[in-house]
Amino acid sequence: MDSFNPFFVKNNTFIQPAYFIISGFIGLPNMKYYYVFLFFVFIISVLGNVAVMAVICLDHNLRAPKYVAVFNLAFVDLLGSCALVPKVLDIFLLNHYYVPYNDCLAFLFFCYICLSMQALNLVALCYDRLMAIMFPLHYHVKVTHKIMFSMITFFWLFVITCVLIAIGLLTRLSFCKSVVINSYFCDHGQIYKLACNDNFSNFVISQLLPFLFLWMPLIIIFSSYICIGYTLAQVVAAQERVKALRTCTAHLSLVVIYFFPILITFTMGSGIHPNARIINLSLTSVIPPLLNPVIYVLHTQEIRLSIKRILKGRNKAKIMVK
């Protein structure tokens, strides 16, 4: 029986908390105005992304492969907004700081899935622009529905697998120190640091996830635009260069809006106040879903024309009914 004592002690000392406490915005002044801002951002994000998805579904002219990625981006933004903002408002506005253990892991899962897919979706859109400018004559061969669907499907499976591994490693941790998460959601990095047993594998995955879903997409996009710039430099007519660059403005705007705030927050490191870091990261999570549909409507002529056609069709139908 003595040989089983170490195993028995380990099982006895393993502590899985009933809940975590989310403390990210607690104590910050005038936060009620920020919650009102989050609420309006959420409503506009939902309406904007649903509108983009509806336009792509309703208009048969928007059946090009790149709109598979645009639709997926709108879907990811919608899912991310619905997963994050209502829960944040529930936690901090209604004072439900105690989040059950399993609910916290589910919260982490959906937030990480959506944030990661936003970055990888920008890679898919970058591939479309790269092929359109570098291989214009072979564009319809290199960018097909099959290729785009395969790319998006691979990204989803890859992200889900990586996040599930991260969550699986969290479930083996014992929490005997604290259950207070100093973030605005169930953040993986904040959770594993609370553990009182070996968390080295969690540390490794916490370093790997930003590389896979932040730095690697950024490197791929940056390298792609170097190739695009080199290709456009070979074009003699300045008018053609400008025309080609205009097709990239929407995508470049999305890249800047998504990556720039994150890079500032990460590069400043410990130089930024913890509260400012939480606010910056929360804005990074909610602002891209708000602006992405606006940018694509304003910068994409096909979507603007599609919206006009749909509105004209409705007006005609109303006139015929009258």
Image: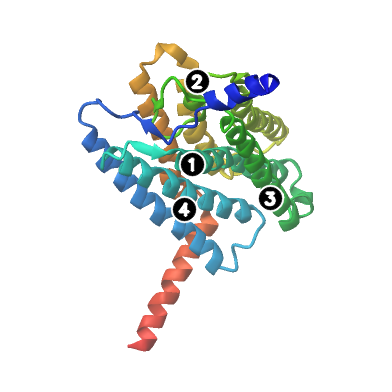
Question: Which mark's residue is nearer the viewer, 1 or 4?
Answer: 1
Q: From the top left corner, tell me how far across and down residue 300 is, in percent.
A: 52, 52
Which secondary structure lies at badge 3? helix
Q: Which mark is residue 153?
A: 3
Q: Is residue 167 above or below residue 203?
A: below
Question: Which mark's residue is nearer the viewer, 3 or 2?
Answer: 2
Marks 3 and 1 sit apart, C-alpha to C-alpha, by: 27 Å
| Label 1: few (<14), some (14–19) or many (≥20) C-alpha neighbours in 10 Å | some
| Residue drawn at (56%, 55%) of the image | 71
Q: Nearer the viewer, residue 169 or 115?
A: 169
* Amino acid type at mark 1: Asn
Q: Is residue 292 above or below residue 64?
A: above
| Label 2: few (<14), some (14–19) or many (≥20) C-alpha neighbours in 10 Å | some
Marks 4 and 3 sit apart, C-alpha to C-alpha, by: 25 Å
| Residue drawn at (33%, 22%) of the image | 275
Who comes first in sequence, dot 3 or dot 2? 3
Q: Nearer the viewer, residue 317 or 48?
A: 48
Marks 4 and 2 sit apart, C-alpha to C-alpha, by: 42 Å
State whether residue 2 appears in this view. yes
Marks 1 and 4 sit apart, C-alpha to C-alpha, by: 39 Å
Marks 3 and 2 sit apart, C-alpha to C-alpha, by: 32 Å
Image quarter in which the N terminus is found: top right
Marks 1 and 2 sit apart, C-alpha to C-alpha, by: 18 Å
- CB of mark 4 within 8 Å of CB of mark 3? no
Q: Nearer the viewer, residue 125 or 322?
A: 125
- CB of mark 3 within 8 Å of CB of mark 1? no
Q: Which mark is residue 102?
A: 1
Name the residue tied to disc 2. Answer: 193
